Structures are given as structure tokens and as C-alpha cells.
Image (cartoon, rainbow, N blue to C red):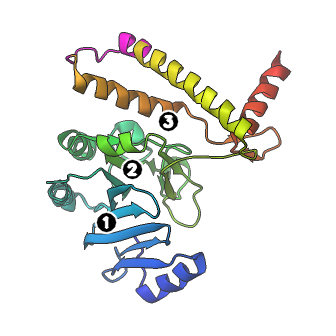
Amino acid sequence: METKKKKKYLESVRRKLGFTNEFYVDPCGLSWGLALWWTEETQISVLNACPNFIDCDTVLTGQNMNWRTTFVYGWPAIRDKNAFWEDMKLLLSPYPKPWVCVGDFNAISFPDEKIGGDVVRPSQVNCLLNFLKQCDLVDLECKGPFFTWFNKQFGWRAIQERLDRAIAFIEWRELFTKAVVVHEALLGSDHRPLVLYIEWYVYSSPITEANKEVEQSLLNRLHELWQREEIHWKQRSRINWLKEGDKNTRFFHLSTIQRRQRNTILKLRGENGRWLDSDTDIKDEIFLFFKKLY
């Protein structure tokens, strides 16, 4: 995150939140500055750092999973953006490990990622789009409110943009097919917190042998349905100009992963206003809603 704060203040906040490890890029005056905090559940080795990013080697403690993570802050000024994107390209070449990048890019990829303010110019979207295409990266998309930045003005002065996101190599996406990006509530800052969940699990009942058997049966059935769905969408897809082969299969597999995450309901606000996040509660709420209709 961009801190704009000195290390002494950040250390007091870190300790209150329970993080055990830290790395900082000091601010310049009242601008910039980056802070990275983590717990013992994750092993992080910082490989490179500058005012724009902190690049790390990441390992989940107790699990045989290793990848590269870059936490990024893109320059807001137009005059500095080209240099930022060139630095990002250099960072990725060569890059043998699965890689994910999370943060404030200060850039949008499509005109509909902004509402209010001046009309979006092509140059405002081309930099990010070209970076994604040239480096074979995918946007992990998001759950929750779409826009991540709000200028805290109202009426005709209000501007909202999706400046924060998570992007990754296809290899990382295939490694973490259940990874979900969630935009949380806007509190204090003009940016929403962006949370990348490596896996999203909510268990609403104790795990027993009977539950495991039922779960495995449902997973097998779900896998079968996903395979049918993939064939269905492949037949209907407008991107069938791709040549057949491994590359084609992988492309459609990635499309299916993205579509599954897009269609997944992580949270649902019930009729009483309470947020539901377990599969059972969400299903029951949907059932009751339609039961009342009919």
C-alpha cells in the first residue's frame, strides 16, 4: 500500500494489527512510500524494491507452493507512466515462476472502468492493455463494488475509477484456480482495500467422514458439469478462430476458470440486512426468496 507515512507511525499500526514481519520503502516528503506486512503463515523474501513496487518470493508455510508476488503503486502523473510500464516489463523478463501482481496501478483498462470527470482518452487505457497483452497476463477480475477509487465528491463532481486490481501469469491462475479478488468497504482512504484470497472456503458444518463422501460425490458431479459447460461454451464461442492443440485447450481452460469465478456468489445480503457467506445460508436465502415469489 502507498503509505505517505514515516516508519515509526507504521510500526505502531503494524503491531496493533498483529503482523509479525515488515518491509518498507520510505516516502519522499508527504508522498509515496510503500509498506508490506505479513505473518508467520507466509514466508516472504524481498527480491527488489523501489518507490513503485516491492517484488517478493512467496512461500506458504507448510505447503509446497512457491511463486512471485509484486505489490505495486503506479505513478499518477501522465509524464511518469511510460517509465513505470517499462520498468514493469523489465521486472518480468525473465520470470520463470508463477507470478501475481496486486496493487494500485493508477490506470484503467477500459472506458467503462471510470464514471464522471473528463472523457476517457485512448492513451489512458492503452498502457495497461498493452502491458497485459505483451506479457501474456490476465486480470483476475473482482467481487464486490466495481470501482476502487472515489474522489469523495458528490453530484457532477463525483469521479469513480477501477485503479486497483490483481493481474497474473496464466501459470499462476492455473495454480490457484479458486483465487478470488474482493473489493472491501471504503473506509478512511479514497481507495477500497483489495483482498486476494488464494482459496475461498466457508464451512458451515463439522467435517465428518459422511460429509467427505458427499462432498467428493458433489465435486465429481460438478467436475462433469464443468466439462460439459466448457464444451458448450467452446462450441458457442466467438474465439474459435484459434488453432486446435494444447494452446487452444489451455486458453479455453483459462476462460472457464475466469467464468467460474465471475459467476460465483461469495456473499449475499439477506432480507434482514445481514451478510451471508456460507454456501448453505446463501442457498437457503435464494430458495426462500423465490419461494415467496411463487
Between discs 3 and 2, the one toward the N terminus = 2
Residue 240, position as x, y percentages in the image: 28, 14
Quarter containing the N terminus: bottom left
The magenta span reads: 232-243
Residue sitting at 55 percent across and 45 percent down? 145
Circle 2: element type: strand
Between discs 1 and 2, the one toward the N terminus = 1
The residue beneath circle 3 is 261
Circle 1: element type: strand
Circle 3: element type: helix
Between discs 3 and 1, the one toward the N terminus = 1
Near mark 2 (Cα within 10 A), the count class, few <14, some 14-19 or many ≥20, is many
Q: Residue 279 or 142: which is nearer the viewer?
A: 279
The residue beneath circle 2 is 166
Residue 190, position as x, y percentages in the image: 50, 62
Quarter containing the C terminus: top right
Residue type at numbered disc 2: Ala
Residue type at numbered disc 3: Gln
Q: Residue 87 or 109: which is nearer the viewer?
A: 87
Residue 1: in sight, yes or no? no
Residue 59, position as x, y percentages in the image: 39, 62
Instruction: Tell me the quarter of the picture where residue 79 sits.
Output: bottom left
Instruction: Tell me the quarter of the picture where residue 289 sits.
Output: top right
